[in-house]
Image: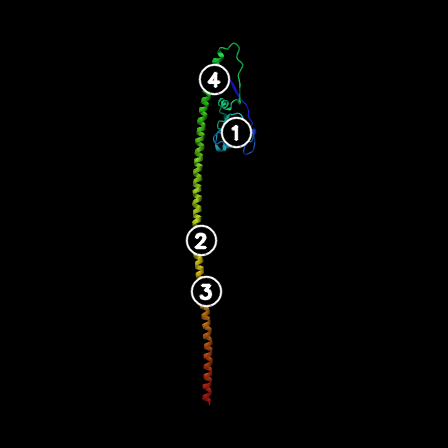
Amino acid sequence: ATLAPKPTSAEGSGMSCPICGKHEELWVCMICGHLGCGRYALGHAKDHATEGRHRFCFQLDTGRIWDYAGDVFVHRRLVQMAAASGGLFELALPAPAVGSSDSAPTTSKALSSHDEALSMELDAILASQLDHQRSLYESQLTELSKQHGLAAEKLKAAREAQEERAQSLKAEVVEVEKRRKALEKQLTSAQKGLAASQEQLGFAKELNQSLLANRREIMAKSGSAADG
């Protein structure tokens, strides 16, 4: 039996490529769930797979899984999708061969058994690869988380150092302000002392001039008395 998927349109579901907005040829990354358009559109799904090394991508329209590392479809999972979709797939049976009605059921059972074994083998391979990709993706996330934590710690340490430096500068400013006020008080006191000293100096000069004048007057009177 041949299973043929009915193509579905992502436009009706409202899904689109978040980068270019296209509704056609949409693919979902099976590692992280990123949605992007296919290589026959603008290739944003492929760009994501190349940049993130996420090798498996699921095509929404057909249900096929693409392996970017091997550049080939893995398999279609049509039996599982037919069972889950409740009739989204059409079953096309080939015409029976003439004169081989007895051998047809045996041949059909053999093919069905072979397809089932092949499907199980492909499922196991895909599950193994997806698990490997998941482990790789989680290890990358863990490494990025560690780097982010280290960067955050460095930024926190730098911020604390800046805050400590700011507090130190603030304390220095307060101390300088205290010294400035003390010096201003000393300057005011010195200016008052200088004014008092200048006043006393002026008084002393006036007193000295008065004494000199009195001396000259006394000497003049003494001279006049001696002449008389």
- Residue occupying image coordinates x 48% and y 33%: 52
Residue at which label 3 appears: 188
Residue at which label 4 appears: 112
* Helix, strand or loop under label 3: helix
The span from disc 3 to disc 2 (Cα, nearest Å) is 27 Å
Residue 27 visible in the snapshot: yes
Decide: marks 1, 3 in contact (CB < 8 A)?
no
Earlier residue among tags 3 and 2? 2
Decide: marks 1, 4 in contact (CB < 8 A)?
no
Decide: marks 2, 4 in contact (CB < 8 A)?
no
Earlier residue among tags 1 and 4? 1
Label 1: few (<14), some (14–19) or many (≥20) C-alpha neighbours in 10 Å: many
* Helix, strand or loop under label 2: helix
The span from disc 1 to disc 4 (Cα, nearest Å) is 30 Å
Decide: marks 1, 2 in contact (CB < 8 A)?
no
Earlier residue among tags 1 and 2? 1
x, y (%) of residue 38?
Answer: 54, 29
The span from disc 3 to disc 4 (Cα, nearest Å) is 110 Å
Earlier residue among tags 3 and 4? 4
Give the residue type at disc 4. Answer: Ser
- Residue occupying image coordinates x 44% and y 61%: 183
x, y (%) of residue 186?
Answer: 44, 63
* Helix, strand or loop under label 1: strand
> Which disc is residue 27 wearing?
1
- Residue occupying image coordinates x 45% and y 39%: 148
Q: Residue furthest front?
A: 86
Give the residue type at disc 1. Answer: Trp
- In the rendered view, tell whether residue 65 sits above or below residue 150: above
Residue at which label 2 appears: 170
